Image (cartoon, rainbow, N blue to C red):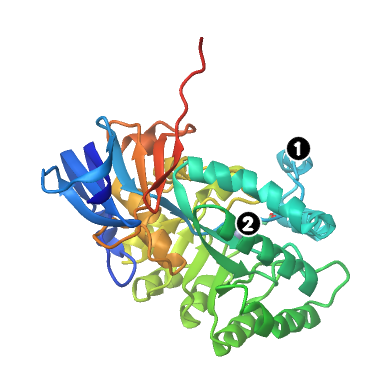
């Protein structure tokens, strides 16, 4: 006897499981079982998925009523744990004051650092919980969460501890990233501060899966980023990098040189970096919601990266300053409109490739996989990036348990 059968699925999306991320042309391949598909779940795992058959019995049956089904989504880049908000910067940005100028003047990330330092563990947990609940409702069951608004031992660890508590209390899988070198604290010497963050790596290794750095003009240089990544690699931590977001510094090439699990942003990545991406297993995590929110014209060159045989993923980058959305479905729409990615590429980018970007065995629905499944109230998989700005997730199952079902209208 099995636990659950989900039957009457109109289209079942099956991203390909493989040892590494899907690269280049492979990103446009997506197996879809059309008409009368079903999924059988036992003990949290998928035991069958494919055409409907009478071979299985279960204590509970869910009628998908012609909805589409996919693995739950994976958001591989967020700053979900932080204090406060920065809506006052929105008007400044519209007046033409740019992101790095606000940071240079002590605002931006440094403003959130002040608010995060003031917040208690409980306040940070309560605030992040609201976003996490929304992410789950929107079909996301694996989330990466970065520190980086503490910039000192106590407050970086506080953020990572909150992130770990979220993983315990909510039905989702988390990956935790130490982003100590996210900005230079007011009045600090950047080299001395970087050394302090490097010294912290031994301790944060027990709290974090990855070490990340913001490599950008006025923040950390390529040389400083290399020093940090080399130190993290030596200590056995996989590295990530916020690279080439605004200025073309060669962050993508550095990520590949340091065998980074992902290089994130990449709006200004060089042609040479994009060429090298195709020969590497580093995943390009693109964050088009950030380009959209910062009001920039130039988006990351997803087409060029895929044409060079690279692996591309997508994330919200949810944070209080440069991308204030926790809706990954919205990012799927922006990826279609601005990155010109195909629907198949987009689905692979928010499932299997996103999982590879954070070393999570998620984003596929093979026999033996965790039964993290979303039923989408949509006629086909192309519909979700097309009808943008709303939630299409109807039912979300985390390890075989229904954790969300879209409510109807309340009427008498
Ligand atoms: N660019 C650096 N860090 C974040 C933004 C942080 C903030 O503005 O608070 C990002 O990924 O976009
Ligand atoms: Zn970020």
Task: Residue 106 in the image: state x and y as whole percent.
Answer: 84, 58
Question: Closer to the camera, 411 or 238?
Answer: 411
On the image, which quarter does residue 361 sit in?
bottom left
Disc 1 on helix, strand or loop?
helix
Q: Which mark is residue 79?
A: 2
C-alpha gap between disc 2 and disc 1: 22 Å
Question: Closer to the camera, 362 or 317?
Answer: 362
Whichever of labels 2 and 1 marks the residue nearer the N terminus, that label is 2
Please give the residue where the numbered disc 1 appears in the rendered image. 91
Q: Residues within 10 Å of mark 2 (few under 14, many from 20)?
A: many
> Residue at horizontal 79%, vertical 71%?
154
- Horizontal relation, residue 350 to residue 215: left or right: left
Q: Residues within 10 Å of mark 1 (few under 14, many from 20)?
A: few
Mark 2 and ligand 2: say if the CB distance to the nearest ligand atom is below 8 Å.
yes
Against 263, residue 95 (above or below) is above
Question: Closer to the camera, 314 or 208?
Answer: 208
> Residue at horizontal 31%, vertical 64%?
22
């Amino acid at each position: 006897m099995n636990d659950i059968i989900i039957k009457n699925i109109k289209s079942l999306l099956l991203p390909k499981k493989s040892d590494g991320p899907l690269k280049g042309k492979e990103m446009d391949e997506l197996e879809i079982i059309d008409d009368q598909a079903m999924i059988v779940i036992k003990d949290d795992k998928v035991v069958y998925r494919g055409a409907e058959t009478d071979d299985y019995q279960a204590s509970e049956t869910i009628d998908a009523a012609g909805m589409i089904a996919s693995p739950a989504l994976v958001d591989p880049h967020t700053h979900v744990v932080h204090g406060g908000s920065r809506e006052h910067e929105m008007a400044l940005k519209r007046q033409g004051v740019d992101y790095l100028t606000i940071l240079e003047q002590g605002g931006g990330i440094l403003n959130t650092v002040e608010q995060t330092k003031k917040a208690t563990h409980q306040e940070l947990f309560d605030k992040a919980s609201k976003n996490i609940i929304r992410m789950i409702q929107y079909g996301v069951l694996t989330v990466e969460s970065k520190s980086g608004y503490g910039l000192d031992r106590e407050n970086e660890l506080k953020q990572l501890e909150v992130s770990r508590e979220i993983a315990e209390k909510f039905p989702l899988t988390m990956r935790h990233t130490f982003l100590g070198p996210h900005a230079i604290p007011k009045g600090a010497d950047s080299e001395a501060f970087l050394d302090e963050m490097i010294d912290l790596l031994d301790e944060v290794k027990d709290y974090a899966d990855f070490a990340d750095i913001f490599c950008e003009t006025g923040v950390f240089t390529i040389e400083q980023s290399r020093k940090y990544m080399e130190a993290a690699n030596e200590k056995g931590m996989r590295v990530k990098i916020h690279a080439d977001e605004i200025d073309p510094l060669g962050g993508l090439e550095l990520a590949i040189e340091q065998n980074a699990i992902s290089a994130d942003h990449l709006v200004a990545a060089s042609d040479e970096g994009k060429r090298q991406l195709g020969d590497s297993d580093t995943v390009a995590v693109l964050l088009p919601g950030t380009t959209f929110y910062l009001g920039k014209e130039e988006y990351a060159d997803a087409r060029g990266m895929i044409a060079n045989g690279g692996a591309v993923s997508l994330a919200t980058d949810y944070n209080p300053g440069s991308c204030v959305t926790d809706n990954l479905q919205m990012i799927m729409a922006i990826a279609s409109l601005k990155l010109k990615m195909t629907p198949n590429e987009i689905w692979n980018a928010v499932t299997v490739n996103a999982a590879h970007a954070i070393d999570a065995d998620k984003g596929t629905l093979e026999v033996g996989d965790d039964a993290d499944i979303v039923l989408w109230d949509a006629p086909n998989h192309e519909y979700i990036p097309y009808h943008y700005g709303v939630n299409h997730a109807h039912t979300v199952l985390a390890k075989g348990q229904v954790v969300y079902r879209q409510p109807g209208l309340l009427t008498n």
